[in-house]
Image (cartoon, rainbow, N blue to C red):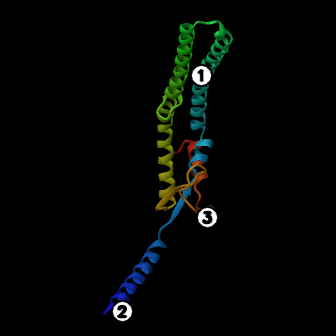
Amino acid sequence: MKHLVFSLCGLAMILGLSSTQAHAQAIKIGYVNSAKVLLEYPEAIETQKKLDVIGQQWQDELEKMDRELKQKYEDFQKKEPLLKDDEKRAQRDELVALQQKGAQYQQERFGSRGALARATDSLLQPIKQKVMKVIEQVAKEQKVQFMFDRNDQILVLLYGEPKYDYTFQVIDRLKRGTGK
């Protein structure tokens, strides 16, 4: 009886695999390197430049705060032997407050939920939507059922034949403006 059950299970698995293989042959799969698309799409390049300017302004302000903290700390170290205990305590508290202010500024601007992350999301979202629309158009025209993203940051695809890489078609359409 056990042999019959195992035989029937084995037969079912073989039939299932063979029908899956026959069905899989009809499926066409492609991939796009979305990072490369964004690096070559003029609208994305301009947006990144804007974000870089914003980020640099905030970075400059953060560096200014850091220089101020270092200068005050050096001044404190020079004066410390001459200060009374309550003056030392007050200046240390001021230094700690400046340090905390800098850390808070950095978190508010550059943290994972900071102003730069929010600006990046809001400015890049419309661009990403355009790219996705063009990817969908290319996939439908090429009769691709599944399109993967293959880029340097995320490994979603372990192997892909170059003939199924539609990255350049997406870039071309975006540059010509036919993906709107």
Which quadrant holds residue 164?
Answer: bottom right
Q: Residue at x 50, y 33 (%)?
A: 117
Q: Residue at x 55, y 59 (%)?
A: 157
Between the residue at mark 2 and the residue at mark 1, the CA separation in whole angstroms equals 74 Å
Q: Secondary structure at mark 3?
A: loop
The residue located at (64%, 11%) in the rendering is 80
Amino acid bearing label 2: His
Q: Which residue is mark 3?
A: 161
Residue placed most toward the observer, 164 or 1: 1
Q: Nearer the viewer, residue 71 or 4?
A: 71
Name the secondary structure under disc 1. Answer: helix
Residue 173 rendering spot, x and y as whole percentages: 56, 47
Question: Is 128 drawn above or below residue 69 in the view shown?
Answer: below
Q: Amino acid at mark 1?
A: Leu
- Above or below residue 116? Residue 76 is above
Residue at image mark 1: 62
Q: Which mark, by number, is residue 107?
A: none
Q: Earlier in the sequence, mark 3 or mark 1?
A: 1
In front: mark 3 or mark 1? 1
**Corner quadrant of residue 2:** bottom left
Q: CA distance from mark 3 to mark 1?
A: 46 Å
According to the picture, the residue beneath numbered tag 2 turns out to be 3
Closer to us: 67 or 149: 67
Q: Nearer the viewer, residue 98 or 130?
A: 98
Instruction: Note whether residue 180 is visible.
Output: no
The mark that comes first in sequence, 2 or 3, is 2
Q: Position of residue 151 (x, y in %)?
A: 59, 51
Label 2 with label 1: CB-CB less than 8 Å: no
Residue under the image location 69 percent in, 11 percent down: 78
Q: Quadrant of the N terminus?
A: bottom left
